[in-house]
Amino acid sequence: MPQRHIVYLHREHPGDMAQLPEYVKAGGYNGLMKALADMEPDDVLYQLHRSGVRGRGGAGFPMGRKASFLPKDSPRPAYVVCNADESEPGTFKDREIMEFNPFQLLEGIVLAGYAIGSNHGYIYIRGEYEHQARVLDRAIAQAYEGGYLGSGLLRSRFDFDITLYRGAGAYICGEETGLLDSLEGKRGQPRLKPPFPAVAGLYASPTLINNVETLTTVPVIVAKGADWYATLGTEKSTGTKVFSVSGHVMKPGNYEIVMGDTSLRELLYDICGGFRPGHDFKACWIGGSSVPVLTAEHVDTRLDYESCETAGTYLGSAGCIVMDDSGCIVRSSLRLAHFYRHESCGKCTPCREGTMWMEKVLQRIVDGEGRMEDLELLESIMGRISGRVLCALADGAVAPIESALRLFRDDFVHAVEHGSPAREPMAPMGA
Amino acid sequence: MSRAAALAGFRVTFSTMLRKPEVIGYPERKTPVFPRFRGRHRLWTHENGLEKCVGCSLCVAACPADCIRVVAEENTPERRVSAGERFAHIYEINMLRCIFCGYCELACPFDAITLEAEYEMSERERHAEIYTKEMLLAPHPKPVPVRAEEPDAE
Amino acid sequence: MSDYAPVNLSAPDQIEFELNRRRLAAPAGTMLVDAAYAHGVEVPVFCYEPRLGGPIGACRMCLVHVEGMRGLQTACSTQVQPDMVVRSDTDEVRDAHDGVLELLLANHPLDCPVCDKGGECPLQDRTFKFGPGKTQFVEHKRHFPKPLDLSSLIALDRERCITCFRCVRFSQEVAEDGHLIMRERGGDSEIATFTGDHYTGRFTGNVIDLCPVGALTSVPYRFVARPWDIKNTPSVCGHCPVGCNLELTEHEGHVARVTGRPNPNYSVEEGWLCDKARFAYPEDRAPDRVRQPLIRDAAATREVAIEEAVEAAALLLGRDGPHAFLLGPGATVEEGFLAQELASGPCRGALVAQLGLGDAPALAGLRAAPAAQLDDIDRADLVVLVGGDPANQQPVVELRIRKAVRGGGRLVSAGPRRHPLSGLGPSYITPPGRLLDGVRAAGPAFRAARRPLVLWDEADLAHEPAAAAELAGLLGATRGARQLELGADVNGAGLSALGIPGAADLVAALEQGTITTLLTIHAQPAESAGAARWAEALGRVGAVVALASHGGGIADSAAVVLPAATHREQEGVYVSMAKRAQRLRPGAAPPGGAAPGWELLIALAHRLGAAPAYRSPAATFAAAAAARPALAGLSYDVIGELGALLHAAPPATTNGAVGGGGADGTGLPLVTTLRIFGDAAAHRSDALSGVRQGAEVVLGAGEAERRGLAGAAQVRLQSPHGACTLPLRVDPRCPDGAVHATLGVPGAGVERLLAVDRSPVRVEVTAA
C-alpha cells in the first residue's frame, strides 16, 4: 500500500496520541526543541520554503512563500491563525488530525509562530466540530501544563499562546479573510484584497493563516529537514496529502499518500476497495465539491497538483467525492447548487443572486419542468458569476456544475425531457 | 384640363348632392364614434372591487397639458382601496385643460385609466369641469355608441 | 447622493493613465471610479461611497478591464497607477454591467410605480443606462412583508434591498452607533437593528439618502410626492450654527422634504445631516404657524391685510422714540442690516440688539487664534473639546470628531457636562466656573500633537475668562494649533459681523420704561435666557410689533404681528460658527399672508418714509457688505453655492457684552444642557414626535442622596432670577457638584433661572 504517514502519525503509534505523554513518547516536540535550541526563526522559515510544502486547505499556495510575505518591520504584533473551519463538502481530513493527533498541530502552530516572530496563535474551528474542539481544548491545557505553551516555553525565551475559537457554522468562514472577520467578532464575509492577510490580517496586523494539515506538517519538516521532505512527491507537489474519500466506494475514509505516486484509479480501486458489484465509476469531484468534475476518462490521473490541473480540475482540499453509475449528476448538481446558495455570504451580487438562480433552474429541471433553453440559461448565469466576485466561493459553485453540464450534457438533456432519473427520492434539503 | 376630367373630379359631389340628406337627431341620437376615439377618461377597478390606480403619478408626468393632479395615500389593513401599497386619495382631471392625447393611458403601468367614447362634458360652472376620482370611476351618465368596426373607405 | 469622491485635477502630483483610449491624469491615490467620473466617464457603482470609508467591493457593478490584470477589476478599489490602461467600454465590461444588473434585479420587485425612490433611483437610472433591457429570470422573486418601520422616521422595504451595505456601514463606521446590521446570510440577508428595536440616533435619516434603491425611505415623506412633481432648491440649515448645506424639496407650495445636497459641501457637513435638520420642516405647517397679519387691541385680535398691518406697525414706530429692535438668533444678515438701517434712519436712536450672546471680551483672544474649518477636524491628530456638547448642539461636528478619532486622532475633552463624545478619550468634568482646571488638565496633550485643533464652546467659555485666556495661551504656544468655535446661536456670527450687540442694554432700557415701541424680529425673548426678567421688562414697553413665523410667546401679545417666512422660505445670508457666509434660498413660498422678513422690513421703511434704495435681499446684502467691514468683499455671487469665508473680524461692541463675574445666588451651580430633539422646532415638527425629548433635572447619585432628593419625582429649582419645576432623574454617572437642567424645551421654563447674558447661576434644589 503506498500510504505514508506524516500528519497521520497516530495511525502508526499504538498509544493515544491525543495525550501529551504519548505524543512526546512518539517523538513529538522534537521539531520544536530542535528549532528553539539551534535554529533562528529565519532558518525555520527557510526550511519551510525549501520543503516546498503547499497549503492543504485548497488553494495550494506554497506555505514558505506565504510566510515570507509578512513584513518584518511591522509595529503591530504578528499572528498565526490556524484554519480549522473544515467545511468543504467531502473533506474530513482535519477532523482526524484534531481528534487523534492534536499535539502535532499545536507544535506546528508554535513553530510557525517562531518562524514569523509571532507570540499568539488562534485556532478557528468550525462550530460543528464540537468533540474535536473539546479534544483540542484539553490538548491546549495539557500543553500549557507541560510547558509546551505559554511564556518561556520549553525553558526557552520564546513565548507563545494559543486561543481556540469556535465558529458558528458558516462555510464562508473557511475563506481566510471571512475567517478573520468572524474571528474579530464581525459578520463573516470575505474582505477586499489587497491588503492580504500577510500584511493586514487579524486586527489589521500581519497574519499567517494556514490550514490544519499544513501546520501539522511543519514539525516533521523541521525535525527531519526540508530536504528529506522534498524527496517525497513530485517537484512541485512535495510531501504527502491526505485524501478524504467518500461516496460509492467500498472503503471510504482518510488516506495519506505520497503525492504523485498514486493514480486516481489506484486510490479508488486498490486503496478504497473499488465499487459495489455491478456498478462502476461515473464521476468524481477530487478536491472537495468546489472543483470541476472528473469522468471515467480521467481515472488514470496522478494525484498531485499538476496532474489534476492537466486533467482540468484542482486537487483542492483532496476531499474526493466518488459517484458510481447509480448516481444522478443532475441531482448532485442541484444538491451542490443548494449548498452554495445556502452558504453564500451575500456580499457580492453575482454570488448571492446567481447561486439562488442556479438552484431554482436546476430544481425545475429535476422536477421535470425544465426547458431546453434552461441549459443555455444556466451557462449564461454561471458566466456572469465566475471571475466577477471577491472570493472563491462562487467560482467553487460554478466549477462543478459548469463541468457537469459540459461533460454530462446528455444527462441534463434527459432530465429536461423526462425529469431526474434518480431511483430513489432525494432526501429533503434544509433551509 | 379636359371636361371629362373635371366631371370625374365632381363625381363624389354629384353622387352625394342627389342623395337624401342624413339628419341625426342629436342629442336624442348620437353619432357612433370610432373604436379608437379618445373621449372622456375612465378609472377602472379590479374584479374584487379594488382600484387599479395606485397613485403613482406617471400620468401626471406624461400629461402635456398638466391637467391631472394625484395625491397618494397609503393603504392600511382597515382601509384598502387599491391593490398596491398606495392609492390615489385625490385623482382629478381638469377637463378644460385636457387635450385628449391619451398619453395618460399610455403611461399607466396598471391599465387603470383609459380614454372612452364619451364626449359630452360641458358643464355650467368652470369648477365642475374638474372631474374627481369618484366621477371618473363611475360610468359616464351620457353614454355614446361605438361603431362596431372600421367603415369602408368609401 | 454624490457617489463619487471629488478629485482635484489641478493638484501637483498628477499621474497619467489611459481610459477608453484617452490619455488622462489624476492625483496619485485616486480610485479609478473617481478619476473616471472626474473626466466624465461614469463607471456605475452601488456599494461604493467614499464618505463611508474604504471600498468594500460588494456590488461588483464597477467592473472594468485593466490591461495586464487577469479578469475584470473593481474600479472602486483600484487606484490609478502610472500608465495604467483601463477600458470601461469593451464588450466584456458591458456584459459584466449587464450581468450584475440582471442579477440585482432578479430579486428586486417591480414596484417602481409605488416606490418613493422611483424617478430618482440610482438602480433605475443605471439599469436604463447600463442594464440588459430584459431579463431571463422567470422564477418567483423573494418576498418579505412590507414595509417595516425601522423607526418612526424610516420605513424599510426588505424586498427592494440590494445588500449594498451602505446603511450598515454608515451606522457602524460613521455614526458609530452600531445599531444597523445585516441579518441572515446570502439571499436571505436583510437589514435590521442589532437589538430588534427601532433605529434611533441623531443621524439616522442619512441612510435614506445613502440607499441606492427604495429600501429605506422617509416615513414623513412617504407617498407625498413623485420626483417629477417637486422642485429641489439648495439651501442651508437654520437650526444650529454649523450651517449644513442641504436641499429643500417643494411640493404643492410647501417644503415637503429636506435632504443632503447631491454635491455635498465637503468643508461643512460632508453631505450628512442630523435628524433635526432633516425632519424639522413640518414645523413650517405647524398649527401655531402665523399665516395672517394680526392687529391686536384692547377689544379684539383681528386678521388684517398685510398693508394694514405694516401701516399699523409704521404708526407705532413713527411715534417719538426711543424704539428698540430685538433680533432673534435665526434672523438673517439682511434682516439685521435692515433693522440697523431703520435705527439709523426713520427710527433714529433706536437700540438694536440680538438675543444671542453677542460679543464677549473674554473670547477675543481665542477668536484671534488661527481659525479652522470643519474639515480640518478630520485631519487633526489631537482634538481638544472645551465645554459644550456638540452631539446635541452642533450635531454634525460629532461625526467629524468621530472621523478624526477613527483616523487615529486623540480626543481630549473638558467641560461641565458628560456628553456622547466624552467616552472617546480622556474627559475632565469640571463644575461651572472651574473650567480652567479642565483646560489645564488637557494642556499636556498639546505637547505631543502636531496638528492640534481646539473646539471651544462659545456659551460655556463666555463666562470663563480664565479658561479662555489659558486656552488662548496654549493655542499661541503650540505650532500648527488651530481653533474652531462651537457657536451658540444660529446666525450669531452674522449678526455680530454687523456689529449688533447682545441684549443686556436693551433689556435694561425696557425696564426703565423708556422704550416706546419694541420690534422683535424672529425673537422670543420670554423663552430665552433671562425669561423672567424679559417678561417683566416687556410689561413696561409701550407697544410691541412682532415679526414672527410662529405663534406663542411674544406673538400672542404683540399689538401687531407681521407673519414672517421661516428660514426654509426666504432668501438671506447666515454666517456659520466657522465664519462661513452661506445663502439661504427659499424652498417654498411662505403660507397665507406671510412674507419674508426682509420684505416686511423694507415695506416698513417705505411706510416710515425712508425707502431704501434696494428692494431685494441680494441688494440689501450688497449694501450691508459695503457698509460693514466684516462683510467686505462678499456678495451673493461670491458666496455662491458653497459659501465664502468672512476675512475681517467683527467690530467690537461695547454695550451688552458678556463675560466676567462669578455665579449669582446660592446652592448648586447650574449646568444647562441642550438636547438635539428638545428645542421648539423639534417640538413643533410632527415628524419628530416619536423622538422628541423633554426637559428634566439630572443630579448625581451622591448629590441627590445628600439633599434627600433620591426619591423625589419632581424638583423645584430656584435661582436669583426665577424658578421652575421639572422632573428629576438621578444618574449615577452624572458628576456631583452641579445640577443639570435641560434648556430650550418649550414650556419647561429653565430659561427663567438664567440671567439675560447667560452668566453662571447657582440654584437651590428642593423637592416639589
Image (cartoon, coloured by chain):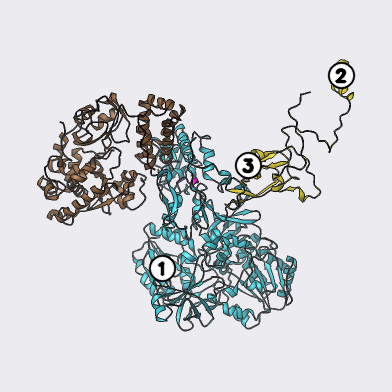
Chain colours: A brown, B yellow, C cyan
Asked if residue B140 shows in the view, the reply is: yes
Whether label 2 touches label 3, CB < 8 Å? no
Numbered mark located on residue B46 in the image: 3
Which of the chains bears the disc numbered 2? B
**Element carrying mark 2:** helix
- Of discs 3 and 1, which sits in the foreground? 3
What's the CA distance linking mark 1 and mark 2? 105 Å
**Element carrying mark 1:** helix
Residue C11 on the magenta span = no
Q: Position of residue C117 (x, y in %)?
A: 55, 47
Question: For the residues tagged 3 and 1, is the chain the same?
Answer: no
Q: Which residue is mark 2?
A: B6
Residue C159 on the magenta span = yes
Vertical comparison of C444 with A7: above or below: below
Q: Label 1: few (<14), some or many (≥20) within 10 Å?
A: many
Q: Label 3: few (<14), some or many (≥20) within 10 Å?
A: few
What's the CA distance linking mark 3 and mark 1? 73 Å
Which of the chains bears the disc numbered 3? B
**Element carrying mark 3:** loop
Which residues lie in the magenta part?
C158-163
> Residue, x 47% and y 59% (percent of image)?
C200
The single residue placed furthest to the left in the displayed view is A25
Which corner quadrant of the image does residue C509 belong to? Answer: bottom right
Instruction: Tell me which amino acid carries mark 1.
Output: Leu
